[in-house]
Amino acid sequence: MAFDIDMIKGVYSHMAERVDKARELLGKPMTLAEKILYSHLWEGVPSKVFTRGKDYVDFAPDRVACQDATAQMALLQFMHAGKPKVAVPTTVHCDHLIQAKVGADADLKRANETSNEVFDFLGSVSKKYGIGFWKPGAGIIHQVVLENYAFPGGMMIGTDSHTVNAGGLGMVAIGVGGADAVDVMAGMAWELKFPKLIGVKLTGKLSGWTAPKDVILKVADILTVKGGTGAIIEYFGEGATAMSCTGKGTICNMGAEVGATTSTFGYDESMDRYLRATDRADVADAANEVKAYLTADPECYANPEAYFDQVIEIDLNTLEPHLNGPFTPDLATPISKMGEAAKANDWPLNVEVGLIGSCTNSSYEDISRAASLAKQVADKNLKTKSDFTITPGSEQVRYTIERDGFIDTFNNIGATVFANACGPCIGMWDRYGDKAANGPRNTIVHSFNRNFAKRADGNPNTLAFVGSPELVTAIAIAGRLDFNPATDKLINEEGEEVMLDEPRGYELPPEGFAVEDAGFIAPVADGSGVEVVVSPESERLQLLAPFEPIKPESLMGMKLLIKAFGKCTTDHISMAGPWLRYRGHLDNIANNTLIGAVNAYNKKTNFVKNQLNGEYGGVPDTQREYKANGIMTMVVGDHNYGEGSSREHAAMQPRHLGVAAVLVKSFARIHETNLKKQGMLGLTFANENDYDLIQEDDTFNFTDIKDFAPGKPLTIEVVHADGSKDTIIANHSYNNAQIEWFKEGSALNLIKKQNA
């Protein structure tokens, strides 16, 4: 039986009334995304039409999910909200703090020893506030959510950008910062700008070597890393309905890589099958009673140009396997063109490691198809040329694939099975020890979602390419980046030419899923007597102090901290990897603030000018000196600033150190919201060319900050070292409520004030 079945039935009980009223107000058929959004309005039954991409809207999500790295800060904030219990079903998943090094058992044992303080904290906070807790080793948050909590037509938010994975089960699931999660856990409305809609029509059917992963790799090629910003992507067509539920999840998962608010699919038979296979027949039965409301009205898919802001069409019959990368998930190369592209770009053809699994591709179907290729190594007398690793997404998947012999198949080709955790996908991979920063230039292929520089192994010289589990497995067997399994032959140990047969697998396990201990600890009915202890001596955890409001006078005489050049993701602003250990200690993790950002003036990282003494030093050290002298600073950036994960640390750390404003050409959605939530100014150049006016020794004056108002740009006087001045107009997207966050010092401060 499903978790929270009464809540799910409650959502379905009012869906028809709310959608019918919204359709009446709109005066036209509705897409699935619109149905879910309008049926989850904070006001209940809709009373007005919202303008896409313009209106800020209050929503009432059904549930919240947090992973351990971001949950620490989210729960530290929630402890200040003045609430005895979470207002909506909430879960915490321990998946980010388990480093991949030796293998599952040893790595999990080490994580429980080194991070026990954090796990104990999260467990006790969960018990105190009525939160479901998934222990270390239970699995990756998004796979566990898909298996246990996601349901068609629902709305959830999660403190991880790949929360969008639940769109594979027809949800609107959105990644947010911890402060947004606190709003919902505290029983308050959650605010989102009403998204635009992108429709992706999938014609034909996947076959052969092409997989669901190739659909999103192609979409990333079309939209780029910022093309989905502010939009929900809705997939439909015969190719969509023919695809497995977990395949849909893979596509939705990587929608984060094009900046989309989320992605989703209409309810169909594959979702019904998946719900029943994961012991949720009650959800499937309930969904079937309202299934017309769990997909778009037929007119929307028949004539999508009339209902979506943008329409993309992909023919799955002609789509071929892709590899995307290196260093960005939208640089797409069809496998048939990889040899040519690698030669032109001098990419190393020798593949050192192939890695499959992660939250993006760790379903039973993914693993079974990869295993069908691994089996051919022995059958065809081949030898795997690259190192090969598997990261199961959940204990349920791991237990089932072990029962069905797939782990033995992988072991027989010398593979390493890591723990059911994020591992290499988020940089928790001890590949080089302490020598990662100066690692050799090399190529790896993986079925993860991101491939930014240093993302997987900390080595800036690792070229990582993203592909399907099938393609990654085939390339690992061949050991070459340019291997096309559809056309190329291999030489086996007998000197014979052989070809790999097309991958074969199962949508769902023929004998059903099985698990002995899924790793779940249910919340207690009354946690009021639970004590949450945080040692003041801890280097891992630190109770939060409220941020002081940024006064108008502090915005005069500001200094430039760094002008970031080119791509500046949340990985650049607040690195993961070994820094994950400090995610619950704001002051300690602040020591990695912007150390990955490239200084526009010298093209170096973590090397900026200190205007107080003219010397160069690390970004955090320089910023701490400004703070000690009572000087606030500004960060300047390029396009899509804050791309990547939902980590609000990328906003909280600069705020803690004394950064008051971030001025960029454009923002990634989640990061812009995180800045606002922490009481900072997130601004964009009205004229992008003004980015070039900013000089290394500049001082900034916000001359009209006292008139801060929705829709009214701010004026920044830029004073150069020679005394000359420029005036820059900065746009913003703050509404009245968000301006109150700024005036109070943070959204959390306002919550506390309202609950006092």
Image: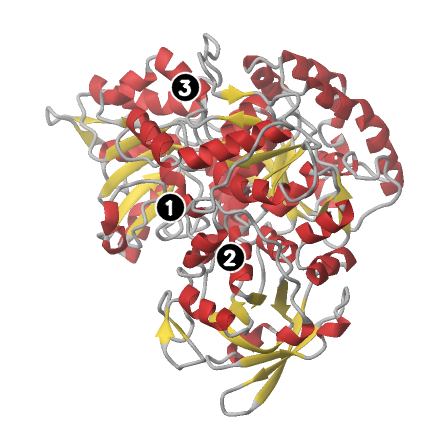
Question: Does residue 235 show up?
Answer: no
Q: Residue at x 66, y 56 (%)?
A: 746
Is residue 541 left or right of 379 when viewed as pictured?
A: right
Q: Position of residue 337 (x, y in %)?
A: 35, 46
| Residue holding disc 2 | 653
Crowding near pointer 3: few (<14 within 10 Å), some, many (20+)? some
Is residue 752 left or right of 340 when viewed as pictured?
A: right
| Residue holding disc 3 | 505
Is residue 346 left or right of 82 when viewed as pictured?
A: left
Q: Give the spatial CA distance, label 1 vs label 2.
A: 17 Å
**Numbered disc 1: secondary structure:** helix
The dot on residue 345 is none
Q: Disc 1 residue type?
A: Gly
370 w.r.t. 538: above or below: above
Q: Disc 3 residue type?
A: Gly
| Residue holding disc 1 | 577
214 w.r.t. 295: above or below: below
Crowding near pointer 1: few (<14 within 10 Å), some, many (20+)? many
Is residue 473 left or right of 690 when viewed as pictured?
A: left
Q: Give the spatial CA distance, label 1 vs label 3.
A: 33 Å
